[in-house]
Image (tube, rainbow, N blue to C red):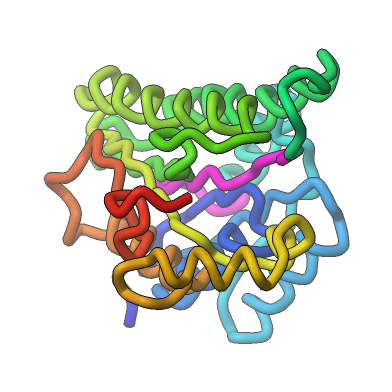
Amino acid sequence: MSRLKGQVAFVTGAGRGIGRAIALAFAGEGAIVGVAEIDRATAQATASEIEHSSRTARAFPIDVSRRDDLLHAVDQLVSEFGRLDIVSNNAILFRREPVSEVRQDTCEKMIAVGLESLIWSAQAALRHMDPELGGVIINNTSPAAELGVAGSAVYSAIKGGVSSLTRSLAVELGPRRIRVNAVCPGTVPTPGARQMNSDAIYEARRQRTPLGRLGTPEDIAAAAVFLASAEASFITAAVLHIDGGITISGGA
C-alpha cells in the first residue's frame, strides 16, 4: 500500500517499541522517515531496516528534550527532502517510583522528554509544513492520563498533559491545516515495558481487557497510519484509544 507515498515523516522515540513500529509502518506506506532516538545504535538500526526494504530513512541520534537539537534535525530532514508532512511523538522517559521518592532532576527530565519535546516538534511543524497542504501531528498518550496508577504520578501527569496539549494544538494549528491527534495505547509489552512489568502483571491485564489479549506495537502503528492518511482528513483533536477496551473496563 502507499497511503503516505511521497510524504516525509519525523518520528521520535523510533529506535524501539511503538515508535519503531510507527516508523516502519510509515515507511511501508511510502513515506520517507526521519528516525529520531537518543541512542545512536537503535536509531541507525531502525533506519537501516527501512532502507533494507527499499524505502528511505535517515537516523537522527538526538535528545528530543533539547529544542535546538530537535529543530536542527527536522531542518536537516527538510533540507534533504524538501518537505515535512507528519510528526509522530513517541519519546518518553519512564520511572516508576512512589511520589515521596521522586527527585527534582528526574521529574524535570521526564517532563522535558515526554511533554516539552511536543512543543518543540509543533514549532518544527509550523516552520516546515506547507501552509496550503497542512500536515499531521500524532502524539502518544496513555490510559494513565485517565486512571489512577500508583507509582506513576509524574508519568500520569505528563500523559494528561499530552492529551490536553493535543486538543489545544488542534485548535491553534487548525487554521494552518495541521491536524493534531493522539494515540492512546493500552498494555503493549514492548521490550522496554517488559523490564518494568512481570509476566504475572501482563496476564492480569490481559484478563481485564475485554478483547482478551494485549496490544502489539503494530496495533498502534496501524492506527497512526490511519490518522496520518487522507482517510482521517476531517479528524483532529481526537484521542484514539487502542487498548482492547481496558480503559473503559477500569484496568491499567
Quadrant that contains the N terminus: bottom left
Viewed as shown, does residue 189 lie left or right of 223? Answer: right
Q: Quadrant of residue 237?
A: top left
Which residue does the image show at 83% across and 22% down from the upper left?
101
Regarding residue 128, the answer to whether it shows in the image is no
Which residue lies at the image location 81% right of the left edge and 24% below the top edge?
A: 106
The one nearer the camera, 193 or 42, is: 193
Q: Position of residue 249 (x, y in %)?
A: 30, 54
Q: Main secondary structure of the magenta part?
A: loop
Residue furthest top as drawn: 104
Give whichever of 18, 242 is nearer the camera: 242
Q: Residue at x 65, y 57 (%)?
A: 14
Please provide the residue range marked out in magenta.
Answer: 80-94
- Image quadrant assignment for residue 244: bottom left
The reply to whether the magenta stretch includes residue 82 is yes
Is residue 30 inside the magenta stretch?
no
In the image, residue 214 above or below residue 110: below
Residue 17 picture location, percent across and down: 64, 64
- In the depicted structure, whether residue 52 falls above or below residue 56: below
Residue 19 location, x and y as percent? 59, 58
